[in-house]
Image (tube, helix red, strand yellow):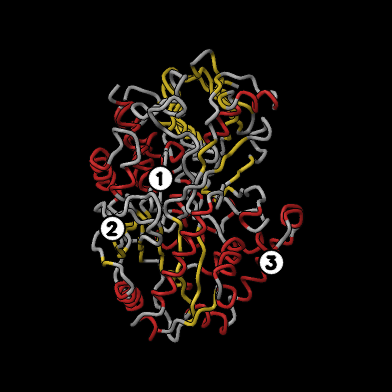
Amino acid sequence: MTLGTYDYVVVGGGSAGCIVAAELAKKLPDAKVLLLEAGDDAREHPETLVADGYKDAFVNDALMHERFSVVDERWGKRRLFMGSGRGLGGSGSINAMVYTRGAELDFATWPKGWRWSDVAPAFERLESTLHPHKRDATDWAERCIAASERAGFRRSEDLNDGDLSGVLGYEWMSYEGQERRSGFTAFLLPALLECPNLTVVTNALVESLEMEGDRCVGVRWRGRGAHVVRPTQEVILCAGALVTPALLQRSGVGNAKQLRKLGVDVVLDQPEVGENLHDHPNVQLFYRGKHRTETYYPLLYGFHRARIRTDLPLAMSDTCYVFYPAVSSFREGLLRLLPGIALPPTLYDRTSLPSVMRSGIAKAFEQPAVKDFVAKLWGIVVILGKPKSRGSVSIRSTDPTAPSAIDIGYFREREDLDVLLDGVEKARHVAQQSPLAEFGARELVPGPMGLSRKGLARWARKNVMTTYHYAGTCRMGDDAGAVVDPKTLKVRGLSNVRVADASVMPWTPVSALNAPTMMIALRAAETIAAG
């Protein structure tokens, strides 16, 4: 079935796709814009629309693409959960709403045209719609800041000023009143009400692009049957760093040798499609306090240089620190992640045991003793901010429902593990400082497992997890090997296919990626609209 023709087809309705589709529809009122999203309309899940709904959204299976990495000894001979948001708004509809631009030094490694002075105005335009801001201070959070200052951090009143060198402060968050301000609520929803030239189709799984020479002439998708839509102008891929490269590979754009083995007709031999995958791996330290934290969001974000002797600029932080009140989402984290950690893949994938485990976890959290324990439990999440290790994502089949092989690449470079362990020691030092120590800081995890450096390394390998910051699989650059042209965001060798999501980041910023991803989307839409 052919849906017809549209001038612009946007694939993926996450943070980036919502912005690209909405801005194109507003800026080009005579153009027909179609947005295809594999998941539901966010309005079918009210928890995605409110600021306090993020915990419920995280455990809603309809709102999460459940993916796993390949098994590797570097991360404890286990597969890692590699989930991402599903439905309009994508991960921006289910995350903790953290809004950070990144450091000025982060963008110094990006191509010309994407340096801090180039992107700061776009961030400002983005913020004029999102209205991100900080939450109110709490006693526990202030104790964390004071302890961090004693351990060598500087208090920052604005984590979006480009200086993330040894600082800690209150995060900006994308909310206003009781409303979450996501790509969907802030951009797409108003456009749906104002722009008759915008069409959104949900539950539309895009299979591949139909190519004639260097031009995409059709987008194939499933949704109550098989469909094809014909773009008269362009296709903009916004499906995220784990899906956008897979879609290109199924369409014949990728490593020619690998594609031929799968029976894919090669359109363009581009070996770097799916390569350069990286993420922010993290480990979590937990402490038992004497008092309740009385803090219901992770409010603080810190950045520091854990290891000086590397080739990073001296002013660039290499690790991030999130002070985590367990009462904010510990229950939901266990509900989502523990079955996948505790159960072998065959039992997790083919039995009802995950549901049984989740039911048991939920019942346990109803007990008063457990509630009291969690209310006094807090942690420091230590995040590797500038990973050097790289992995890949590659299709195993032409079937769009078949999982790709995700090699997340953690610790491929030994230096990454060393930096993360130094960050753990930094976090431990913070926890020992006044006035946090007086609040209560009895270390539970890693505890005895981390008494020696070797023990700490074994613990880190077995407990490392994703921060859901996947990037780089269609990196932009001026070199011949880069997948995307940095001036246009077009796939090199294709005339009307662009990528506008975290896939294009050559090296991830040290901080969370939602804001930089939305900035990329906004600039992409402005570039297209300007002709």
Mark whose residue sits in front, 1 or 3: 3
Which sits in the foreground, 26 or 122? 122
Q: Which residue is mark 1?
A: 184
Q: What's the distance in space between the residues labelled 2 and 1, CA to CA?
A: 24 Å
Identify the element where label 1 is drawn: helix
* Dot 3 amino acid type: Met
Residue 179 versus residue 33 in the image, above or below: below
Which residue is found at the position 63% from the left and 71% from the top?
A: 361
Residue 275 lies, in percent from the top left, at 53, 36
Q: Which of the two discs, 3 and 2, sits closer to the camera?
A: 2
Vertical placement of residue 48 versus 17, above or below:
below
Please say if the residues under marks 1 and 3 sit with CB atoms less than 8 Å apart: no
Question: In the orientation shown, which residue stands out farthest toward the front?
Answer: 309
Which numbered circle lies on residue 357? 3
Tell me the quarter of the image containing the N terminus: top right
177 sits left or right of 243 in the view: left
If you read the primary sequence from the N terminus, does the residue marked by circle 2 or circle 1 appear first? 2
Residue plotted at (51% across, 47% down): 389
First in residue order: circle 3 vs circle 2: 2
Task: Tell whether label 2 touches label 3 (CB within 8 Å).
Answer: no
Using the numbered discs, state the Cα–Cα distance from disc 3 to disc 2 in whole angstroms: 39 Å
Name which residue type carries label 1. Answer: Phe
Q: Position of residue 436 (x, y in %)?
A: 37, 80
Going from N to C along the chain, the mark reached first, 1 or 3, is 1
Q: Which of the pair 204/357 is nearer the observer? A: 357
The residue under label 2 is which amino acid type? Answer: Leu
Per the rendering, the mark at residue 96 is none
Q: Residues within 10 Å of mark 3 (few under 14, many from 20)?
A: some
Tag 3, which secondary structure?
helix
Q: Which residue, given by chain and number where applicable, does mark 2 sit on?
A: 159
